[in-house]
Amino acid sequence: MTAVLSCRNLSRRFGAVHAVDDVDLDVEPGARHALIGPNGAGKSTLLHLLSGVLSPSSGAVALEGRDISRLSVSRRSRLGLSQTFQHSLLFLSMTARENVALAVARRHGVRPWPRRRVHSAVADRAGQALGTVGLADRSEVPAGSLAHGERRQLDIAVTLACEPRLLLLDEPAAGMSPAEVERLGALIELIPPEVTVLFVEHDLELVFRLATTVTVLHLGAELITGTPDEVRASDAVQEAYLGTEGQHTDLFLRPEPAVDPASR
Amino acid sequence: MNAHATVAPTVESAGAATPRGRRDIVRVVLLVTLVLCLVGLPLVADPFATTTATRVLAFALLAVSLDLLVGVTGLPSLGHAAYFGVGAYTAGWLSIHIGIDGPVALLAATLAGASVAAATGWLAVRSGGIFFLMLTLAIGEVLHQVAHSWRSVTGGSDGMYGVPATTVGGVDLANPGFLYWYVLGAFGVGYLLIRMVVRSSFGAALRGIHDNEPRMRALGYPVFGYKLAAFVIAGAGAGLAGGLLVAQQRIVTPDDLGFTTGALVLLAVVIGGAGTLWGACIGAAVVVLVRDYFGPALDGHGPLLLGIVFVIVVYVMPRGVAGVAGIRGKERAA
Ligand SMILES: Nc1ncnc2c1ncn2[C@@H]1O[C@H](COP(=O)(O)OP(=O)(O)OP(=O)(O)O)[C@@H](O)[C@H]1O
Ligand SMILES: [Mg+2]
């Protein structure tokens, strides 16, 4: 089985900081692959290297066996790789519907003249996508006026509207209320199995609810990749998370994440 | 889409059905009145006023084309007058040396504006924000210098004079009223075409780029190509406006594509409220009236007055005339 996405010897330095250090990763088709690790472990940087937002210092990225290391973000997106960002990137002056419509419209072809039928098809599709994430009654609200949790939901609606084959989510639950996290979990469970999901998340309860594979990143390097149970049992992971404090609590049995994501 | 004349996302949900229907009627009545006033103007105004109005139209089309860059795409250009000048010189040269018909000269001016915008835009649109401002300023200055030094074609600092009166189908439009209608017609075509672009899915993508360029990339939009396309379309509009300018002035000087013109048209867009095409037209009217109408009476202090107008606009109505009119829909979020 060839991996949907794989990277080899992927590194990215910022000056002296090795944000991502020689990482090999294979994301299998249909996987719900979680990427966890303490703050500053390089999770976001790794996602950015995969989606093309950042270019690597060295190493290669392949999508379904094809080397995409040199392709731009927009090319990778058109190949079916879509990303949400840790800090939601939305079109704040536009309504929720218009945000999603931009994602839908690209797939219908963009023209500099009006096309009524396409326009209404796009609007309908955008409305549906909003319904899926539970924002149906907020579709005409400017994205800038949405609450934080709603923005994250909108972010996912926009990304799903790209109809990706591989979805990269960077801390989708950050700053969400428990009810919103619950809905988010259900939403991710509803994503069709042919769409592969690679997600970064601090909420370990959510991670272990969804993930089929877990990779732990520590100081830019891959610590372990395995099934949720293997990772839960690993001593190295305990140490990486608990660091010098030397506490011996089982981190993964406690719902509290190591760091409060809402503080960022 | 409905008949909103705005560029900003329109509000669909605001009122109930009846007030909205009423608002549409008000809008249609206003629009018809406006068109009648514009068309009827030469019948009541004296020739000098008609001529000024003609110049306002040419400048307004320039401002509308710039608004596609500044207000819609978020690319503030200081060198937009360059393509205006290219259009004016092209139409002027063809009229003098080949004696082509007015509309053909306008078409040539449009194409020339688009071509030069394509040739320079691929460099400019790689940057954004203040760098884009500086790059377009530099490009404008280079073309300004070319206009000065390429004497055999442009006439250098004396300008390209002796442009014959515009002819349409062999009939010449020496009468200011006829010329005004001709320019009004061409302005209308240019305005409606740019408005069509702004309201299309391509226009929505340009607004997306304005709002959040990285996300547009993540959505798979080839942002560079879109910005270049917007730049070329804006250049075409500026070229057409230049063709209209020379039809009225019948002389082109390097000043027409200089820094002052570029700054004035940017001022017009800001006064009108960037992102609103009709606002840009109002801004253009204010700028031309202050410069050409009140300016001489102020003994050369027109620019000072414009400076004051600018400061007032920035402080009192940060979203321009259109913002005050409140038709732009919901606020942009901070
Ligand atoms: N643009 C940048 N310039 C310099 N250093 C950076 C940059 N981006 C990230 N870093 C550094 O790289 C390291 C990894 O950062 P990254 O954001 O990838 O971590 P993360 O695992 O996503 O952390 P968090 O859980 O806080 O989101 C950190 O030390 C960070 O300071
Ligand atoms: Mg991060």
Image (tube, rainbow, N blue to C red):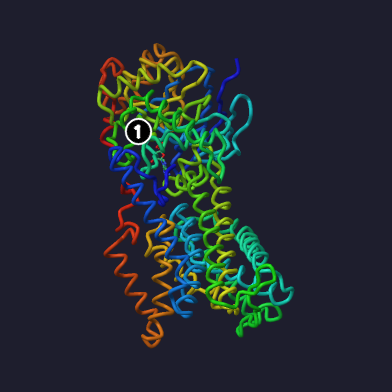
Task: Tell which of B221 and B28 is nearer to you.
Answer: B28
Q: Which residue is mark 1?
A: A139
Q: Is residue A240 above or below residue B276?
A: above
**What is the secondary structure assignment of the residue under circle 1?**
loop
Q: Quadrant of the N terminus of chain B?
A: top left
- The location of residue B117, given as percent across then percent down, is 60, 60
Q: Is residue B261 above or below residue B218?
A: below
Which amino acid type corresponds to the residue marked 1 in the rendered image?
A: Ser
Q: Is residue B226 left or right of residue B111?
A: left
Q: Does any portion of residue B132 appear in the rendered image?
A: no
Q: Is residue A230 left or right of residue A52?
A: left
In this view, which residue lies farthest toward the bottom? B299
- The location of residue B47, given as percent across then percent down, is 48, 79
Residue A88 appears in which quarter of the rendering?
top left
Task: Tell which of B41 and B101 is nearer to you.
Answer: B41
- The location of residue B313, given as percent across then percent down, is 31, 66
**Residue at x 35% of width, y 29% of height:** A153
In this view, which residue lies farthest toward the front? B43
Q: Residues within 10 Å of mark 1 (few under 14, many from 20)?
A: many
Task: Tell which of A24 and B205 is nearer to you.
Answer: B205
- The location of residue B209, given as percent across then percent down, is 47, 47
Q: Does any portion of residue B112 appear in the rendered image?
A: yes
In this view, which residue lies farthest toward the top? A229
Q: How many marks?
A: 1
Q: Is residue A212 left or right of residue A250?
A: right
